[in-house]
């Protein structure tokens, strides 16, 4: 049984959105007490618990950053399902009272895997201890 679960988002086909997925193996080695699970934002996120831990690529940041304020997540207009992203899903789940809180470990779009793993390791240790 794992102490924590962290859902890992990303797109393996899109280079700037694939870094979190490439880090799963190294993160599992560093944190054997944490379940790191690849997750698609179109899956049933509401079934993953009331307190979510997520690793995802975030546009516009320079370092791995912890985001806890769902209301601060910028979203754009939704015209098609391609426009519906994690930010929209989290806002809807909070409004419907399916989740209480979220910790998003945001990974910059342009970061090396080595820098990302170093920064993530530090942030995960300090946030989940």
Image: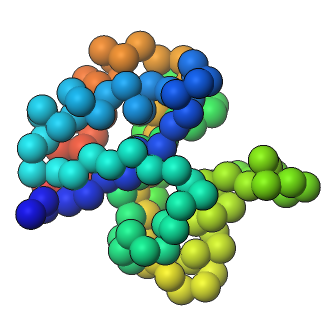
Examine the rendered structure and indicate whether residue 116 appears above or below residue 21.
above
Task: Residue at 60% x, 58% y: name it.
Answer: 42
Quadrant assignment, res 38? top left
Task: Residue at 27% x, 40% y: name it.
Answer: 123
Residue situated furthest right in the rendering: 79
Task: Residue at 17% x, 44% y: name it.
Answer: 125
Task: Residue at 29% x, 34% y: name it.
Answer: 24
| Quadrant in which the C terminus appears | bottom left
Quadrant assignment, res 90? bottom right
Residue 9: where, in percent of width, then height? 48, 43
Examine the rendered structure and indicate whether residue 5 appears above or below residue 63.
below
Residue 126 in sight in this render? no
Residue 31: where, in percent of width, then height? 13, 41
In this rendered view, identify the residue nearer to me: 38 or 83.
38
Residue 82: where, in percent of width, then height? 78, 47
Residue 102: where, in percent of width, then height? 43, 63
Residue situated furthest bottom in the rendering: 97
| Quadrant in which the N terminus appears | bottom left
Task: Indicate how the structure is coloured in the image.
Answer: rainbow
Residue 92 in sight in this render? yes
Examine the rendered structure and indicate whether residue 57 appears above or below residue 46.
above
Count of marks overlaid on the render: 0
Locate residue 16 relative to residue 76 in the image: left or right: left
Locate residue 33 relative to residue 111 in the image: left or right: left
Locate residue 93 relative to residue 53 in the image: left or right: right
């Amino acid at each position: 049984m794992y102490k924590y679960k962290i859902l890992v988002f990303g797109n393996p086909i899109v280079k700037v959105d694939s870094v979190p997925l490439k880090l799963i193996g190294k993160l599992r080695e560093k944190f054997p007490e944490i379940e790191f699970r690849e997750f698609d934002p179109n899956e049933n996120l509401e079934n993953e618990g009331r307190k979510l831990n997520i690793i995802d690529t975030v546009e516009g940041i320079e370092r791995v950053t912890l985001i806890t304020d769902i209301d601060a997540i910028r979203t754009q207009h939704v015209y098609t399902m391609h426009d519906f992203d994690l930010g929209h899903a989290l806002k809807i789940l909070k409004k419907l009272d399916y989740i209480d809180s979220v910790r998003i470990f945001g990974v910059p779009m342009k970061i090396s895997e080595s820098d990302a793993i170093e920064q993530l390791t530090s942030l995960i240790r300090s946030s989940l201890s």
